[in-house]
Image: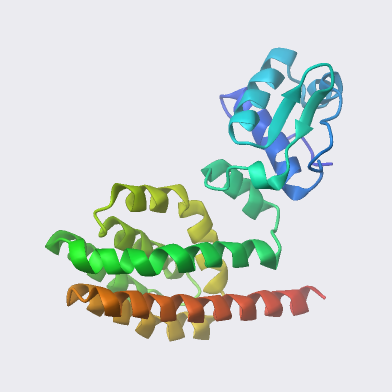
């Protein structure tokens, strides 16, 4: 069980929610099972029942738990978890998720981002195109092995979603920023694969610049397919290293 000695934030119940949420997403508390006795958890974490209940409210809102009268608090099946919640995503990445988790993220991206690129080609403004160009240039200038590699990649994709001028697309980018950042951090771990991705990003940018929605969609599809293959290679390499 994790140590509860980490520094606490000002909001104690948020800290408790983080502790318990991390245990849930890591599998320490299994879906379908009930959370251990509240008194025991409160004693372990050094918090009151009121604080614990406030933390439970947060976790309930995120879909992780549910209270059952006379039975207690149960971990909900994973399908009910709000995977677009920034905190839930952060807890998931902190628990060293398996390859299936990353692949699910890429499958979602392959559904959304090609269409986003098409919309950006149709609706982007000159200012948004400039932001996309700046993000791409930052990718080219990023020194391999530094945080600038994945941060510039993230900026490119967020700028693209913003350039759709669709409020739902733009909001989605902000919502899953944590997931994108962590996946880019991992996929850029191998220098050659990051460098190899640059022409694909440039092709997407140029298609959006030329306001060609069909080509922008096609280039983004190709970029994501190559990115998924690169991620699979990285995950396999990390697995071999761990063994």
Observer-nearest of 146 and 193? 193
Q: Residue at left 35%, top 66%?
A: 115
Q: Residue at left 59%, top 35%?
A: 62
The answer to whether residue 6 shows anywhere in this view is no
Colouring mode (rainbow / by chain / secondary structure / one colour): rainbow
Query: Residue 181's x, y, as percent?
Result: 49, 59
Is residue 70 positioned above or below 114 on the image? Answer: above
Query: Residue 243's x, y, as percent?
Result: 82, 76
Query: Residue 169's x, y, as percent?
Result: 35, 53
Q: Quadrant of residue 210?
A: bottom left
**Left or right for 55, reference 127:** right
Observer-nearest of 178 and 102? 102
Is residue 156 positioned above or below 144 on the image? Answer: above
Q: Quadrant of residue 55?
A: top right
Observer-nearest of 195 and 71? 71
Query: Residue 140's x, y, as percent?
Result: 34, 78
**Left or right for 60, reference 169:** right
Q: Residue at left 51%, top 86%?
A: 192
Q: Quadrant of residue 154?
A: bottom left
């Amino acid at each position: 069980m994790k140590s509860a000695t980490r520094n606490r934030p000002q909001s104690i119940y948020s800290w408790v929610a983080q502790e318990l949420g991390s245990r849930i997403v890591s599998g320490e508390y299994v879906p379908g099972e009930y959370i251990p006795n509240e008194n025991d958890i409160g004693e372990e974490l050094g918090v009151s029942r009121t604080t614990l209940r406030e933390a439970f409210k947060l976790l309930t809102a995120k879909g992780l738990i549910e209270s059952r009268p006379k039975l207690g608090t149960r971990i909900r099946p994973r399908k009910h978890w709000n995977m677009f919640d920034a905190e839930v995503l952060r807890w998931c990445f902190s628990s060293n998720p398996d390859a299936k988790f990353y692949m699910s993220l890429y499958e979602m991206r392959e559904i959304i981002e090609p269409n986003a690129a098409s919309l950006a080609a149709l609706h982007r403004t000159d200012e948004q195109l400039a932001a996309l160009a700046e993000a791409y240039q930052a990718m080219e200038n990023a020194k391999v092995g530094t945080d600038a590699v994945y941060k510039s990649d993230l900026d490119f994709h967020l700028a693209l979603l913003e350039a759709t001028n669709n409020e739902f697309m733009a909001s989605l980018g902000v919502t899953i920023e944590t997931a994108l950042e962590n996946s880019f951090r991992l996929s850029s771990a191998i220098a050659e694969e990051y460098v190899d991705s640059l022409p694909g990003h440039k092709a997407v940018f140029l298609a959006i610049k030329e306001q060609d929605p069909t080509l922008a969609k096609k280039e983004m599809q190709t970029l994501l397919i190559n990115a998924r293959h690169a991620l699979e290679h990285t995950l396999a390499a990390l697995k071999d290293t761990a063994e």
